[in-house]
Image (spheres, rainbow, N blue to C red):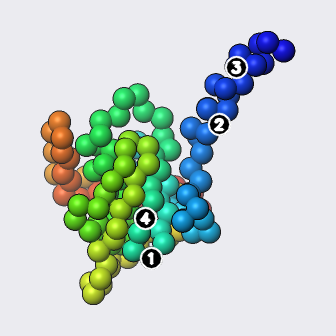
Amino acid sequence: MAMIAKFLPMLLLGALAACDSPSVTFMGTKKTIVEIDGTRFSVHRREDRVEVYRTSFEVLPKRAEVFAKAEMAIEQATGCKLRKGTLEGDQALLTARLACDGEQPRPALGANLIYACQVVDGAHVTRHDMSVEAIECTLVEA
């Protein structure tokens, strides 16, 4: 019994860490799973807002890389660019506002599907920033 009590908090924490359920605000929304160069995200959208969870395991992921990849995942999943200065959060959970206002968004990836995306042109990473010119996405699971 003492052994169970000792490991129960770690088991519960592990179960919560693997969770990608949306917050109350985003409950009932469809999610699109996008993987950018090995980093997997669950993207939930409600109107012009998104909530993104990094669901892949990475040891000490760099904040700039996670944010850049999350931005790419959001743009692929929604077809919209991000409103400048709205991407907030940490390496696990991010939120942002979309800038689809008045613009014709490019086609978005379908919801409730899983995609793998690779950077194919112009990747440049510095300590605090990452820029990419082009990525390609393919459907992994339907």
* Residue at figure coordinates x 56%, y 50% from the top left: 20
Instruction: Say whether residue 94 is visible.
Output: yes
Q: CA distance from mark 1 to mark 2?
A: 30 Å
Q: Tell me if 33 is positioned left or right of 72 in this view.
A: right
* Residue at figure coordinates x 47%, y 50% from the top left: 53
Nearest the viewer among 107 and 88 is: 88
Q: Which residue is mark 4?
A: 50
Could you tell me the amino acid type at mark 1? Glu
Describe the element under mark 3 as helix, strand or loop.
helix
Q: Which residue is mark 1?
A: 47
Q: Which residue is mark 2?
A: 15
> Which of marks 4 and 2 precedes in the sequence?
2
* Residue at figure coordinates x 26%, y 68% from the top left: 83
Residue neighbourhood size for the residue with mark 4, other residues' Cα within 10 Å, grouped as few (<14), some (14–19), many (≥20): some
Could you tell me residue 105's position as x and y percent?
Answer: 32, 79
Describe the element under mark 4 as helix, strand or loop.
strand
Q: Which residue is mark 3?
A: 7
Location of residue 27 (image quadrant): bottom right
